[in-house]
Image: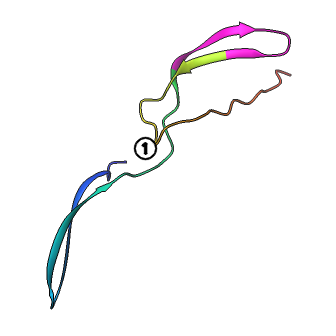
């Protein structure tokens, strides 16, 4: 992510020279969600949890999260 930003591009050959600017966005894994994790509702069939989005999203909008269940035994 530290390589994201504006870059200058210069192309030249015997016919001439051309310059331009390009914006580079590096996409990578987002940071973990920021806490605290809140338990909003608990039922015998489901639980509703919530948290705040991560500070760094990896360079794109986050659409969903995957939450996995683990047996306690």
Q: Is residue 59 above or below residue 37?
A: below
Residue 66 appears in which quarter of the rendering? Answer: top right
* Left or right relative to 44: residue 50: left
* Left or right relative to 67: residue 18: left
Give how far across and how far down residue 51 sits, in percent: 55, 19
Q: Is residue 62 above or below residue 10?
A: above
| Residue 42 colored in magenta in the image | yes
Numbered circles on residues, count: 1
Q: Secondary structure at mark 1?
A: loop
Give how far across and how far down residue 55 sits, in percent: 42, 30
Residue 19 appears in which quarter of the rendering? Answer: bottom left
Report the magenta residues as a range.
Answer: 35-48
The residue singled out by tag 1 in the image is: 59
Q: Residues within 10 Å of mark 1 (few under 14, many from 20)?
A: some
Give how far across and how far down residue 22 sits, in percent: 27, 59
Identity of the residue drawn at 69% across and 15% down: 48
């Amino acid at each position: 992510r530290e390589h994201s930003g504006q870059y200058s591009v210069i192309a030249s050959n015997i016919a001439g020279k051309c310059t331009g600017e390009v914006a580079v966005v590096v996409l990578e894994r987002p940071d973990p969600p920021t806490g605290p994790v809140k338990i909003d509702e608990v039922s015998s069939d489901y639980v509703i949890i919530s948290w705040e989005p991560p500070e760094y999203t990896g360079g794109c909008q986050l659409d969903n999260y995957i939450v996995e269940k683990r047996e306690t035994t």
